Image (cartoon, helix red, strand yellow):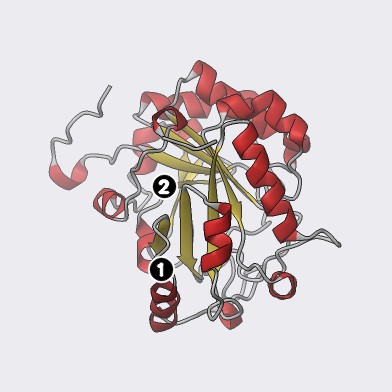
Amino acid sequence: PSPAVPQEGDDAAPTPTSVNYHFTRQCNYKCGFCFHTAKTSFVLPLEEAKRGLAMLKEGGMEKINFSGGEPFLQDRGEFVGKLVQFCKQELELPSVSIVSNGSLIRRQWFEKYGEYLDILAISCDSFDEDVNVLIGRRQGKKNHVENLHKLRQWCREYAVAFKINSVINRFNVEEDMNEQIKALNPVRWKVFQCLLIEGENSGEDALREAEKFVISDEDFDRFLDRHKNVSCLVPESNQKMRDSYLILDEYMRFLNCRNGRKEPSKSILDVGVEAAIKFSGFDEKMFLKRGGKYVWSKADMKLDW
């Protein structure tokens, strides 16, 4: 059902059409600019997470994106797998996606849960392994880029749309990624400008110091210009990122990033979706403007598997 038309201008709560649920803050990578850091080790019990997801569906959610931390850490990928299956099978959401660093995903996971997943987004900031090491986007001896190609192939085999997320920062801003991105042929390449969030990767109580990674708007524009012929590229400036994402944390609280830090609402599990979302700082117009709503169900994509 389409969401009710808001009556009272600004007083009406926005509809949570697309939600990013960061159900864990734990991660096996140590990216220097991470803006959702391991401040807690809390993860909701599976049934509570499902209850919250059902409430969001009731409130108008059409797309859920599972994120972290690293979503495949919890229960060796079973936790996110069960949530993906629940959202597609029980809630019948048009779009179910995951953002992951890809390091912990196994073929067995695709065999079991691939059919329920519309989009897998893998974070990759550089095709130069030395740069990935500098950034912290790796664990042990594993080659992040090689792994990316393996995951690309599995997505083809199991009919999951493949997306790449890249954070543009001081260490990769001069890179030319045209050939590699074209070779991987993602449905969408999200290119984020490195973002400072106080209390996460900036300031006194932060677990990361991302200042040294930050680039100017001009730097970012130069990177975009270098890749202007990549048709799947979707740029995300700091301004777009701050207000046009609905972020749900590990307690299912909406996080308001408007003031440059993450201010939590009360949990939807306690006060309901509408009361919580009013505190989220979510800019529905900006969400639509940045192209936040796109063909996001694999059933509607013309994919050359």
Is residue 240 visible in the rendered structure shown here? yes
Q: Residue furthest right?
A: 141
Residue 279: percent from the left, percent from the top? 36, 48
Counting every numbered tag in the picture gives: 2
Tell whether label 1 touches label 2 (CB within 8 Å). no
- Residue 190 position, x and y percent, is 47, 57
- Image vertical order of residue 186 relative to residue 60, above or below: below
| Front one among 87 and 162 | 162
Foreground mark, 2 or 1, reads 1
- Mark 1, Cα crowd under 10 Å, few <14 / some 14-19 / many 20+, is some
Compute the Cα span from label 2 to label 1: 15 Å
Q: What residue sits right under mark 1 in the picture?
A: 238
Which percent across, then down, holds residue 60?
34, 29
Residue found 57% across the figure and 56% down from its top: 183
Q: Tell me: 51 left or right of 148.
A: left
Query: Outermost residue, top direction?
Result: 90
Say whether disc 2 or disc 1 marks the residue closer to the N-terminus: 1
Percent x, y for residue 203? 57, 76
Q: Is residue 83 above or below residue 283?
A: above
Whether residue 45 is visible, yes or no, is no
Residue ID at (59%, 58%): 36
Name the mark on residue 139. Answer: none
The residue wearing badge 2 is: 246
The kind of secondary structure element at disc 1 is helix
Instruction: Give, as a three-letter code, the residue at label 2.
Output: Leu
Q: Amino acid at mark 1?
A: Asn
Which quadrant holds the C terminus?
Answer: top right
Helix, strand or loop at label 2? It is loop
Quadrant where the N terminus sits is: top left
Residue 30 quadrant: bottom right
